[in-house]
Image (tube, helix red, strand yellow):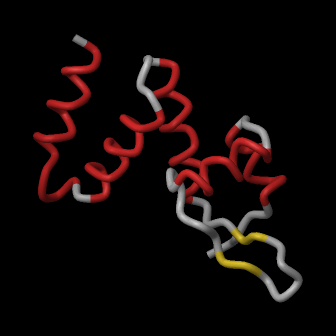
Amino acid sequence: MKTLTIGKLAKLAQTSIDTIRYYEREGLIAPPARRASGYRDYGPDVVGQLNFIRRAKHLGFTLSEITELLALSSQAERDMAGMKFAAQAKLG
C-alpha cells in the first residue's frame, strides 16, 4: 500500500493541510502512522474520508453530525439503516 504525505493528501482531497490536522485533532480521521522523521504517512483511503467530510459539510451537516455518520459508516454491515435514517433526518 502506498502512503501519502500530508501535502499530497491535501492536494488529492482538495483541502488544506491545516484542515487535515484539525480533523485529526477532532477525531474525524484517525491519526496516521509516523515515519522516524516525524512525517505523517496517510493511507489512500483517507482521501475518500476527506471527500465524504467535505460533501457532508456542503449538505449542511455539522462536524459533530459528520463524526456520527463516520462512526455509523464504519459499522455499515451492522447498522446501515441507522446511517440512512440519520442522513434522511438531517436532509429532511
Place residue 50 in its image quadrant.
top right
On the rendered structure, is 52 left or right of 1? left
Depicted 19 relative to depicted 71: above or below: above
On the rendered structure, is 6 left or right of 73? right
Q: Residue at x 60, y 48 (%)?
A: 23
Check the image and name the residue furthest to the top: 92
Q: What is the quadrant of the C terminus in the image?
A: top left
Q: What is the quadrant of the N terminus in the image?
A: bottom right
Residue 21: image x %, image y %? 71, 53
Q: Nearer the viewer, residue 13 or 58?
A: 58
Q: Nearer the viewer, residue 7 or 19?
A: 19
Q: Residue at x 83, y 78 (%)?
A: 38
On the rendered structure, is 28 left or right of 2? left
On the rendered structure, is 42 left or right of 39? left
Depicted 31 relative to depicted 78: above or below: below
Q: Residue at x 32, y 44 (%)?
A: 68
Q: Residue at x 40, y 45 (%)?
A: 67
Place residue 5 in its image quadrant.
bottom right
Depicted 87 relative to depicted 37: above or below: above
Residue 16: image x %, image y %? 78, 39
Residue 55: image x %, image y %? 50, 27
Depicted 1 relative to depicted 45: above or below: below
